[in-house]
Image: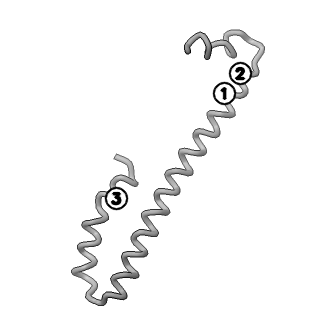
Amino acid sequence: MSLLATATALLPTVAGLLDRLIPDPEAKARAQLELLRLQQEGAFKELDAALQVNLAQAKINEVEAASQSGFQAGWRPLAG
């Protein structure tokens, strides 16, 4: 289970705790907003990491496809 999925699963529990621990509606709203902001930052970090992996693989694919070697450049059509 990814960190994002875990955080999303725990969100209702943490929100329920905020209801009990913070009686002031304004302070509770600020705390919930901060919780959502932290959750989004985690999601963006996870997406950015996946994007970086995909970009690195695309660069590798370009280099392999430009090779003059039939074994290196030709494996894609053979495997496909």
The numbered dot on residue 10 is: none
Cα separation between marks 2 and 1: 6 Å
Where residue 75 sits, quadrant-wise, is top right
Q: Of callouts 3 and 2, which one flags the residue occurring earlier in the amino acid sequence?
A: 3
Amino acid on which the number 2 mark rests in the picture = Ala
Position in image of residue 80 (x %, y %): 55, 15
How many marks the image carries: the answer is 3
The answer to whether the residues at label 2 and label 1 have Cβ atoms under 8 Å apart is yes
Which secondary structure, mark 3? helix
The residue identified by callout 1 is: 61
Q: Residue at x 67, y 30 (%)?
A: 60
To which quarter of the image does residue 29 belong? Answer: bottom left
* In this view, 64 is above or below 39: above
Give me the disc on residue 8: 3
**Mark 1, other Cα within 10 Å: few <14 / some 14–19 / many ≥20:** few
Image spot of residue 32 (x, y percent): 37, 75
**According to the image, label 2 marks what residue?**
65
The type of residue carrying mark 3 is: Thr
* Left/right of residue 74 with respect to residue 45 in the rendered view: right
Q: Amino acid at mark 1?
A: Asn
